[in-house]
Image (tube, rainbow, N blue to C red):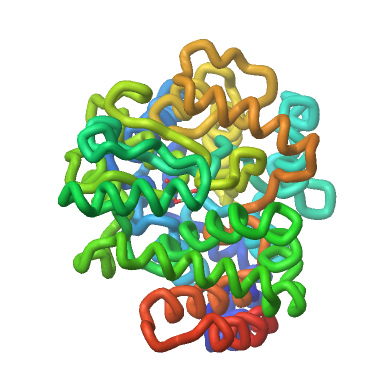
Amino acid sequence: MPAALPLPCRRQRLALTALALAMPLLAPTAAQAGEIEVLHWWTSGGEAKAAQALKASLQAKGHQWKDFAVAGGGGDAAMTVLKSRVVSGNAPAAAQIKGPSLQDWAREGVLAPVDDVAKAEQWDALLPKAVSDIMKYKGSYIAVPVNVHRVNWLWANTEVLKKAGAKLPGTWDEFFTAAEALKKAGVVPLAHGGQPWQDFTTFEAVALGVGGAEFYRKALVQLDPAALKGPTMDKVLATFKRLKPYTDKNAAGRDWNLATAMVIKGEAGMQIMGDWAKGEFVAAGKQPGKDFACAPAPDTAKAFTFNVDSFAMFKLKNEAGVKAQKDLASAILSPAFQETFSLNKGSIPVRLNLPMDKFDACARQSSADFVATAKAGTLVPSIAHGMAVPAAAEGAIKDVVSQFWNTDAMTPAQAMDRLVAAAKAR
Ligand code: BGC
């Protein structure tokens, strides 16, 4: 967790280490027998339906769910609340934690491994290795993966595109042509919410499309200074900035699901967002292929930015709580839950080889592309969603990208210098 802590990290880290040592004494008292408190940030329409499926599967095993939802897309607010709860000795029983920050939490000694469930149910054989590696700390499972989200998606209102005479774009050139047509038709071409994680979700789609997977990996995963500051990044930043005039004046601070709602209602034509956006369309009764369309973000059809949701369990003292944690871990990977959850969430199951017949064409494409891109070496982690870069560097590069987006006078050259400096943040 140290890398995930905002400043002043050191003091908080010491407090946390002391807490980890004292954990058996300070284990959560709020959780009663068979009741577990679960922290997550699934509060939008589609997300809440998916969270409800998780709650139901715990209750089906005779346990009680204490909801600890912290609103805020992307989970930044939830992670801040989680840190303060753990530091004050009041950890929830389970929390939605993702990517490399799982390692940071495990290092602090506050997580309870779920190895016995994982061994009994053969998770190694059920999961793609790229996913199980993220869930393990020193060879032990410290988290259970829920689903796979594809982040590099573009969503569009089919009726609005049609009325504007615009075509669903497959390339960035086509995107700008469609955006112009939508603008002329009097709708907002690109629905956007000006929050750092949403700015970065758009930015990483542009980086992948304009630069390709190898560039993406060098610049945004390996944080190679030569890739962060070079002609390809220059082009990426310039293209990214070209999108801004196609967003509306009220974008600043807007939540992602309200941006999706603009597309649903026909106020906007398109949105670049991970497939949790599909959960909103579906929750609003809209059908893919009819009311709305999905396409890989421009020029990224042969690549896939992945984002895996996962839950980690915090050490508990009471046996009933521990039993409930294990039952929750087991329920999450059951075939029935995997299907119901992802149908609501917009994602695809993380468990391998499950039938996809109940899923729509967007999900089936995602599932096929997940496998194909893994083989082709173009499956890359989403930076916007905490899947690759240490938290301090991730936060710093997100800030630079948002500053660039919001500051008309900032040039790509200035942004690149700042990106190189931000990548060194520890
Ligand atoms: C999570 C999704 C969530 C989205 C918006 C992402 O980081 O992985 O599960 O729906 O944020 O809140």
Q: From the viewer's side, name the closer residue of 155 and 66.
A: 155
Q: Quadrant of the N terminus?
A: bottom right
Q: Quadrant of the C terminus?
A: bottom right
Q: Residue 36: image x %, image y %?
A: 45, 43
170 displayed left or right of 306: left
408 displayed left or right of 351: left
Q: Residue 304: image x %, image y %?
A: 63, 43
Q: Please give the name of the residue rendered at 66% of the width and 39% of the height, measured from the top-left corner.
A: 302
Q: From the viewer's side, name the closer residue of 190 and 48.
A: 190
Q: From the viewer's side, name the closer residue of 245 and 331.
A: 245
Q: Please give the name of the residue rendered at 45% of the width and 71% of the height, measured from the top-left corner.
A: 84
Q: Please give the name of the residue rendered at 23% of the width and 53% of the height, measured from the top-left corner.
A: 183
Q: Please give the name of the residue rendered at 75% of the width and 56% of the height, measured from the top-left corner.
A: 214
Q: Residue 382: image x %, image y %?
A: 60, 54
Quarter of the image where one finds residue 218: bottom right
Camera sees residue 106: no
